[in-house]
Amino acid sequence: MRERDDTTTIPSNSQVPGPVVRACDNAVMPASWTLSGPYFLVFAFLCGVAGFRVGWRLRGRFLLPVCQGLFGWMAFLAAWRFVGAAWAAGAVLAWALGTTLASVHAFLRHPREADERVLRARTYREGMLEWIETGRGPEQRPAATSASHARETIWYAAAAVLTANLASIGLGAVLLNYMNAYVATLLRAAVMPGRVLLLAWNVWSVTRVVAYVLLGAAAAGPMLRVFGWGADATVLRRLAIAAGAGLVLDLSLKLALSRRCAAALAASVDVQAARAGRSASHPLVLDLD
């Protein structure tokens, strides 16, 4: 008696709706990984690295965030178009990680060039080192800190709405660059590198970056819908709610933990070496010739 053959052959000229799939051990595998969310995360990470490297080589204070922003926006749009708004927000986070790793590496090796090519690098660093030395932070003026955060959020959201997230990603690049230049300074002057690596990126700053990324993706929806790239309204609403919660958490952590984090960093960094842009283990040499 012949066994039944369950194999079905699809004629070459037949129409198969949807993406082609392959069944293997009861699992359905996508025919093309390049249309999946993780692919766009990897692509965005590489865009973060490439955008920074291109802008860094152009040696311009404004060209650096412009290049980073354009590469980040390209990754954002590609993810939005193929896998949706939530993955697009994830792509911007991956871009931020890529540009952070590339920039910290460059800033560690070239501190003088970092001050020359990064907007607000010196100003931000001096303010943060003063905070580490004195311990006086935003918890002493909560109303002013809250107002400042509100203004920044409004500007960021407006930029995202009007430019479909392009200008807001560029503003995020400026923020990341001067934060990462400061982090590179702390790592260079660290006497306890492990603790500095853990604390140099303030937990509230990381929270704010994530919140801004979610806010930018949500705010880009109306403009992209005009161009026919609509997104699920429920997803956009959830991104906006998560962004709002993140911004509240950012401010709360900043007010609650600022003094403790300053004290921990003060015990882990040679602040005078950090001000001079040198390593903690490198002796200060006065050139009197």
Image (cartoon, rainbow, N blue to C red):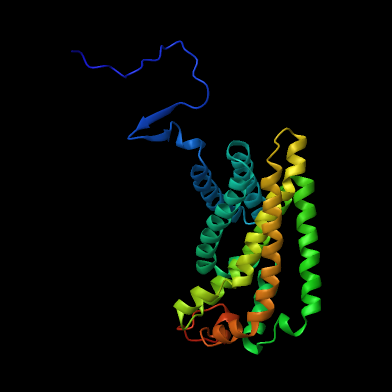
Q: Quadrant of residue 134?
A: bottom right
Q: Residue at x 56, y 56 (%)?
A: 99
- The residue drawn where x is 59% and y is 82% is 261
Compared to 274, does 65 lie above or below?
above
Vertical arrangement, residue 259 with respect to residue 69, above or below: below
Query: Which quadrant would residue 61 be assigned to in this image?
Result: bottom right
Q: Is residue 27 left or right of residue 62?
A: left
Which quarter of the figure is the C terminus placed in? Answer: bottom right
Residue 119, x across and y down, in percent:
69, 64
One can see residue 61 in this view: no
Query: From the viewer's perspective, is residue 260 above or below residue 246?
Result: below
As drawn, the residue found furthest toward the front would be: 1
User: Residue drawn 57% across and 85% down?
Assistant: 271
Tell me residue 106's x, y (percent): 52, 63
Residue at far left of view: 1
Report the label total: 0
Between 75 and 25, the one lying in front of the other is 25
**Image position, residue 20 (x, y; %):** 46, 26
Q: Residue at x 59, y 42 (%)?
A: 79
Which one is in front, 116 or 30? 30
In the image, is residue 233 above or below residue 265?
above
Residue 75: x and y in percent read 59, 44
Quarter of the image containing the N terminus? Answer: top left
Residue 134 visible, this angle: yes
Left or right of 32? Residue 251 is right
